[in-house]
Amino acid sequence: MPILEIFSQGEEIVTGQTLDTNAAWLSEQAVQLGFTVARHTAVGDKLGDLVGLLKEIAGRADCCLCTGGLGPTSDDLTAEAVAEAFGLPLEFDEIAYRQIQSYFSNRKRPMPETNRKQALLPQGSTRLDNDWGTAPGFAVQAGHCWFAFMPGVPSEMCHIFLERVKSLLNERFILNPSRLVTIKTLGIGESDIQQRLGEVKMPERVQLGFRAGVDEVQTKLLFPADYPEKDMAALTADMTARLGDFVFGIDGLNEETGNLAAAVDKLMRDAGKTLAVIETASQGLLAAKCLGYAWLHSAAYEQSLSALGERLGVAVEMSDLAKTGALLAKALQNQNPADFVLIQLYDGSPAQFQNKDQTIILYNTLLNRESFQQIRHNLGGPAGRKQNQAALLGLDLLRRHLQNRKI
Amino acid sequence: MPILEIFSQGEEIVTGQTLDTNAAWLSEQAVQLGFTVARHTAVGDKLGDLVGLLKEIAGRADCCLCTGGLGPTSDDLTAEAVAEAFGLPLEFDEIAYRQIQSYFSNRKRPMPETNRKQALLPQGSTRLDNDWGTAPGFAVQAGHCWFAFMPGVPSEMCHIFLERVKSLLNERFILNPSRLVTIKTLGIGESDIQQRLGEVKMPERVQLGFRAGVDEVQTKLLFPADYPEKDMAALTADMTARLGDFVFGIDGLNEETGNLAAAVDKLMRDAGKTLAVIETASQGLLAAKCLGYAWLHSAAYEQSLSALGERLGVAVEMSDLAKTGALLAKALQNQNPADFVLIQLYDGSPAQFQNKDQTIILYNTLLNRESFQQIRHNLGGPAGRKQNQAALLGLDLLRRHLQNRKI
């Protein structure tokens, strides 16, 4: 597999003011295309550092994806560094210049003289047109390494990569793209997943990996390019079955599921149902995750449980939140035309909520016209994690109900 | 200033599965301590790559902060690579071993034999005790470069850096820490800020920078260590005055403000006031940002404006949202004992909301017992940005009122 490196230029990255999301994104793309990514490097805006680094990489890698340093100001030195490192003098590119001019004229703004610099490209390079910003990128062969230089603004970089660089990579390199299948779960930890999957006989050519995020735990299967589709589906199905109800989505096999909210959105639209929710621990975050979903009719947060009870005409019993949840759900259903009613309550003081070493007990109650389901969870960690988990577990109760139609 | 590099080890970083937040965090720390950060490098888990890179850095930098590769598994190769690169054979560290043992016995779990490996440290290295996980770190001098090796788990890395490494850096290097002042604004763009600040005569030794984030735009002033406190305060005050009401906080001068929600929290607590809010465009996100703030009494989201009007007994006029906002605010105030009532409405179809190239018009109405204020904004960009801006602008209206007491 060809060896690829990622190179990021920018004082703001080296000083830690900006997180280098470009490097991670480009690496994922490169791995999926079939490259071996060997190294990431970031440097600031000293010409000598840039020149030295470009020479190093040219002697080491088959391909290098570079971002940053293409802007109009004096600390944008990438083209100059390429010219010096590889003996390719800068030349004025008439087409690039006209593109920069029209960028400004389209926006009815005068083009500052400094932007002229962005039309200077190293001799013999291939221009990478940038329809999304001012600076064109460029690609250049140096020794046995092919370099692509892209802007540092993430949206422009993604566009140029997907629309220009990707096809050039496929032309220039013999690549065997691997296939990545991701099984997405909520409510089960990485070690429990590993235990459940321990008995699966893993084919030697398949790489198994795990990634625990804030919103989901991902079980990743990386298949070589020539792996039979049928065997890939069979292995994924076996593993999914072992993880059971915890699986809310699978990416990379047929369609992409997206995150949990997107999975619930699809199920709710298919079922043609609507929802009203009362949040406590998640304090608006469950509703916020459902942005743009027409099936969410209403959401409410009330800090005081007794104020909430009063509003809905329910006698709140702090010592019996299961019962209180059920009563509130019925009362809300009587007031509200939504098909589903979701009530989230929790047992725990504000101090317990804020303390990362203490847990709260979450009571989720889901009610529809025919049936009723209630589930209890222990939530730990910092307040923000408790909030996020409460939002996700509410959505997940809905997902499980819609998927199983059991309640 | 001494030259520092950041070195991250891990296949998950190089393949883009994990974003290297450690590198950015350590860089910020290093800059504030007074280092010049010259380079970040990340490599995977090939021994040869690691050895080569360590030698390179030893010939280039005065100091290197390293993360990752200290775990118990066979792909955790940092100590081995250090041993090979610098000719420092691994030695069994009895104290490290006992610490690893007690980590497991404290958790009532048997210590796997593989963890024994974590007690092997390069000859002559300084152990960096890890009270927050299994793997101790270590520091080693190689040539004229001092290396500190820390675990890759961010929470453990932060602890070891702050509790162990920072003081060692201050002992070993002559550092002149610079001082960073950050002026934080909302509702004004970077170019408008630059225009307003254009006439300020910037002292040559002060570095001016900008950072536009999702939640705020930061104007950054970096002062050299010996810059007079009085002049620093005067320059900051001058710039803050020019930015006027848009400034919600200043970090680095006296106290840290935190984000906008934290600034509003302080003002609300000082004023002893409470709030009830109705969200539309932000759909729960305003409430979610106020997690743990006791002054937020209630929040509601209702997808249908007519359903909302019916609930509060107000005749909704879609053609006059300013008037409707005022009527809803009064109606909510009559039902709700909170001191402030905030009503957020917007003009725009669901399609306009979702379309990143179209705008919606936001109407924020703030009412308290004595007075009334209404403000209108145009919101553009992707749906998630509109949602976030709507949440922030609601909080910001409250912030301006509390700061100015003008309405």
Image (cartoon, coloured by chain):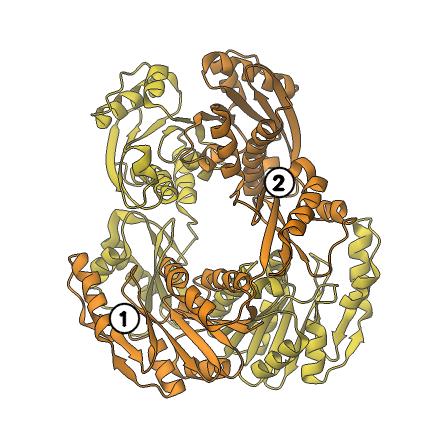
Chain colours: A orange, B yellow
Residue A103: name its quadrant: bottom left
Is the residue marked by circle 2 packed among few (<14), some (14-19), or many (20+) residues within 10 Å? Answer: many
Q: Residue at x 50, y 16 (%)?
A: A332
- Numbered circle sitting on residue A186: 2
Indicate the secondary structure of the residue bearing disc 1. Answer: loop
Residue A79: name its quadrant: bottom left
Q: Do pointers 1 and 2 mark residues of a single chain?
A: yes
Image spot of residue B351 (x, y percent): 32, 36
Image spot of residue A94 (x, y percent): 21, 74
Image spot of residue B195 (x, y percent): 21, 59
Amino acid type for the residue under numbered disc 2: Leu
Q: Chain of mark 2?
A: A
Of discs 1 and 2, which sits in the foreground? 2
Q: Residue at x 17, y 66 (%)?
A: A111
The residue under label 1 is A72
Nearest the viewer among A93 and B300 is A93
N-terminal-most mark, 1 or 2: 1
Q: Is residue B407 visible?
A: no
